[in-house]
Each structure stands twice: as C-alpha cells, then as structure tokens.
Image: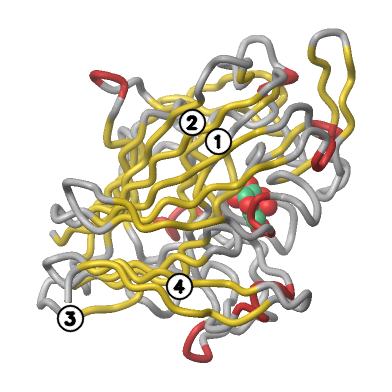
Amino acid sequence: MAGVTKSSFGKLKSGAAVDIYTLTNKNGLVAKIMTYGATLTELHTPDKDGKMADICLGFDSVAKYEKGHPYMGSTVGRYCNRIGKGRFTLGGKTYKLATNNPPNHLHGGGPKAWDKVIWKAQIVARPNGPAVQFTYFSKDGEEGYPGNVNASVIYTLTEANTLKMEYAATTDKPCPINLTNHAYFNLKGKGTILDHELYIAAKSYTEGDEDLLPTGKILPVVDTPYDFFAQPAIVGDRLLAAGGKEPNIGYDLNYVLLPGAKGYATVARLSEATTGRLLEIRTDQPGLQFYTGNFLDGTLTGKGGWKYVQYSGICLETQHFPDSPNHKNFPSTILMPGQTYRTKTEYALLVK
Ligand code: GLA
C-alpha cells in the first residue's frame, strides 16, 4: 500500500527508542529511514524485469548501527567530509573539533555527530509522494562547533521513482554547515560494485594529500583515472590506478561538479548491466565525494548476512568541498544567523 508507516526499530543502549519509517510509492518502491542518524536503511527498487532488490548497504538491527559503522545511509553533519586538523577560524576565533580521522576531523566528529543522534520525525504531506521530515536541534558548542543549529531533512519517495532529500538549517552564530547522505549503493544488491558503470559530470577535482585532505589545488580529470566525464567507465577498470594507501586502494576523492542549468543538475549516473538498474544523482551542490568502499574489510555483516568486503558498495556524496572553512578559493560553507541553509539531492531509481 502506498503511503508511510511508522514502527519501532528497537532501542539504543541508553534505552532511547528508535523508530523506522517505511515509505512506499504507487509503483511499489520502498525506502526505510530510521530516526537514529536520520539514516536510510533500505531502498527497494525494480530491475529491468520488475524484480525488486534492496540496493543500499545497512544493518538489520539498531544495535549493529550503534556498535559502529562507516556512515551507511547516514545523514552526515554538521560538516561532512574532512576539516584539516579539526580546526578552523571564524570571526577571529579558532574552533577545535574532534580529530576522529587522524590527523583530521571527519563527518561531524564524535558521539554527537549527526549520524549518531536521534532525530525527531513526523510524517508530512508532499504533493509528489510519501514523505517524512526529520529534525535535530544541535546545541551551541556541540562537537566543538559554534551556534545553536536547527536542522531538518525531508525524505520523499516520489511517484517519479526518486528518493528526494531536502535539507534546511538555521543558526544563531556563524557556523560551517555541509550536509550529505552517505548511502552505499550496490545495484545488484550483492557482490561488489566493480562491474558498475559510472558517469560523473565533472572536469576537475580537488587534489587531496595522503590523508585525503584538499591541498587547495583544483586539477583537471582529463587523462587521469578520475575522468568519468569524457570517458564514463566500469568502476573496476581503472581502480588500481585510483590511489589510496595499501590495502585501501580505490576511489575516494571530491569532484568539482559542472554547474547545472537553474542550479540543479544530474551530476552522476551509475548503472549495472545484468539488472539494468540505473541510478541518477541530481543535486544543487558544487561537489561530489566518490568513494568505492575501500575501507570495508569484511568485518561488518549487514542485512541478510551479507559480509561487507572491500568494494561492496559505492558512495556518491553530494556536498560542498572538503575543508572549505580553511580554503578561501572554495565556495563558502559558512551559514550566518538570519540565513537558511537549503539544499536538495535526489536519487532517481531508473532502469536502462
Ligand atoms: C567518506 C570518506 C572516506 C571514508 C568514508 C567512511 O566517503 O571520503 O574516506 O572515511 O567516508 O568510511
């Protein structure tokens, strides 16, 4: 039945209850999002023969999420990706954040990073499909960031078979904000993503150092293994040349997206030949972190007993550039009091 249902997804160790919302659209697609981290836990889409599969990595209990995982399906904030040495200066004051990805800050930091807190949820009316809004109030100083911030994300599973995420945030002090959804996709719902084909609408990327922190340089992708624009390619084909430290070889870099008409564009297309599934990513964001699950090492067992080995899933995280607060040449990520941060990203769930 099309619509939204709410159920319990268990409790955290603290006893706090976690709910899960199931969105079903008229075409039978299903998305599940839980209040812990406003996390996308399941996404069921048809293949070319109409056969459904769950194309997102994740776990079947909240206990497994709480035990620790690499942001599978999470809403990541206040600042996704890296901030160099966990430090930035704003209005003459230097703020210190957790260096949870030594020597840098990653994905909002420690226990109060937004993927690890419980968001409030309410079913909302949207003209184009079933929807749920998640809200979180982050106190001034939380994880070292300035300002009381009210954040929200509305997930809508549209009748056009897109999962849409609309983010908003306000603050009472200037603060960097950079939100993303960190879904790991596998269009077969099993195996690895090395056989998936990818297109990215970008002619350049932000160069990273050995800890994946931007050097500040923006380099062209042409004639590099990073070119998925002039040369859409099978992900596994050039993977060994993509960089990374042994044994974590693979793609993990931020693309500078080509600006879309009206500020909104299809920025990536991921497809898989045997199922015919095609995922199109649309966004208004300037950057895209492309990550091939290089750090997955088979120690986590996900839904249905699936062992998450290296390259089990692919992340295409729409966002601002990493470490923007420390790079004047990158588009600004500072939200000012009185302004509203707004951004949207859509996962179009298609078949070829
Ligand atoms: C992002 C980063 C990766 C890694 C994953 C989570 O995609 O770019 O380096 O930290 O998140 O494991």
Are the residues tagged 1 and 4 within 8 Å (C-beta)? no
Closest to the camera, between mark 1 and mark 2, is 2
Q: Name the residue under label 4.
A: 192
Whole-Å distance between the Cαs marked 1 and 2?
6 Å
Q: Nearer the viewer, residue 93 or 284?
A: 93
Closest to the camera, between mark 4 and mark 2, is 2
Which residue is found at the position 80% from the left and 9% from the top? 91
Q: Mark 2 points at which residue?
A: 287
Are the residues tagged 1 and 2 within 8 Å (C-beta)? yes
Secondary structure at numbered mark 3: loop
- Return the mark for residue 254: 1
Which residue is found at the position 70% from the left and 18% from the top? 174
Q: Which of 180 and 237 is in front in this view?
A: 180
Closest to the camera, between mark 1 and mark 3, is 3
Decide if residue 81 is on the left or right side of residue 190: right
Whole-Å distance between the Cαs marked 1 and 3?
33 Å
User: Is 174 above or below relative to 319?
Assistant: above
Q: Name the residue under label 3.
A: 51
